[in-house]
Image (spheres, rainbow, N blue to C red):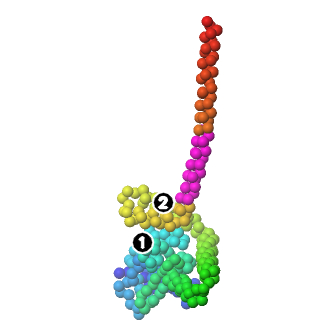
Amino acid sequence: MAKMVKKRCAFCPEDEECAIMYVAEGQNLAAHQDCLLYSSGFVESEEYNPDNLDVRFDVASVVNEIRRGKRLICNFCRSKGATVGCEIKTCRRSYHYFCALCDDAAIETDEKQGIYRVFCPKHDPSKRTNHFDTINKRKRINQMTMKSSPMREKLSTEETAAENGLRVLREKHNRHKVRIEFLRKCKQAGRLDDLFEEMLDTLHLAQEKLMDDNTSETEYEETVISLFDCGLFENILTNAHSGTEEKIQELIETRKRLDTQIELLQDLKEVVLPAQENIASASSSVSE
């Protein structure tokens, strides 16, 4: 079976892990080592030898993983090819490896055990542990020193909530800065148009799947979930809902005006009929 051969980027520092690449000689195929190791569906070669890391990956396995990634959208850059999934099985976030780093995902590595895991920011084990440790510590302090003061306990709880809120805001701000800088660099590199074209291709593919009666239930559900996970789609639905509400209010106002006009015409009708009868009676008397 054809193998990938270990190479190193000539422009990167020697101690840079991302500089290590694997190349399929004679084929138009190359991949970063970390992109391969952290891909969720990746399996190392059965002939893998820890003492010979220059030959480590089968070309066929890499091609299959690339094919699988074409159906997955990156939670960070929203482009296809996101083969790195969050380790929590119920989480649907997927990334390109370097996008996971940009999104502050947690990387867990144990080369001896062959463990290469990624946790999205929401499911980062270290953040979750530290968060609960802090809460438990504050609870113990409150129990020991503030039992006699409900007001002080309330203030401490409010301070904790405020601190947590500030921490969340700082994390969001940092993520936004990274994303803004990422898109700015894409524009500078002439890649922004390509990203939007891929987004449109992805939306068209999702539309085809939802319209196709032969789409499996699992694939249908995955497509719907992916669409709602995308902020753009959610914003479109919000705008559509807002537009619908405005149209309803406009029609209600129109109906009110029509109801008023109908009432006025009914009143006019009640006045016109007797007048016509009087005119008819007067004409009949004159003729006699």
Q: Residue furthest top?
A: 288
Q: Secondary structure at mark 2?
A: helix
Q: Is residue 263 left or right of residue 30?
A: right
Q: Vertical placement of 222 versus 108: above or below? A: above
Q: Is residue 213 left or right of residue 280?
A: left
What is the CA distance from the residue labelled 2 to the residue labelled 1?
Answer: 19 Å
* Spot occupied by residue 145 in the image (x, y as percentages of width and height): 60, 89
Q: Which residue is mark 2?
A: 204
User: Is disc 2 surrounded by few (<14), some (14 to 19) or many (20+) residues within 10 Å?
Assistant: few
Q: Residue furthest bottom?
A: 51
Assign the magenta stretch its main secondary structure.
Answer: helix
Pick whichever, 284 or 118, lies toward us. 284
Which residue corresponds to the image point at 48% horizontal and 69% vertical from the top-left?
73
Q: Secondary structure at mark 1?
A: helix
Which residue corresponds to the image point at 61% horizontal and 20% vertical from the top-left?
276
Three-letter code, disc 1: Arg
Q: Is residue 39 left or right of residue 133?
A: left
Pick whichever, 8 or 184, lies toward us. 184
User: Magenta includes 238?
Assistant: yes
Q: Is residue 246 visible?
A: yes
Q: Vertical placement of 105 versus 288: above or below? A: below
Q: Residue furthest front?
A: 148
Q: Is residue 62 visible?
A: no
Residue 68 numbered mark, or none: 1
* Spot occupied by residue 155 in the image (x, y as percentages of width and height): 63, 80
Which residue corresponds to the image point at 38% horizontal and 90% vertical from the top-left?
49
Q: Quadrant of the C terminus?
A: top right
Q: Bounds of the magenta span?
A: 236-258
Pick whichever, 274 or 248, lies toward us. 274
Which residue corresponds to the image point at 46% horizontal and 72% vertical from the top-left?
92
User: Is disc 1 surrounded by few (<14), some (14 to 19) or many (20+) residues within 10 Å?
Assistant: some
Of the residues under marks 2 and 1, which one precedes in the sequence? 1
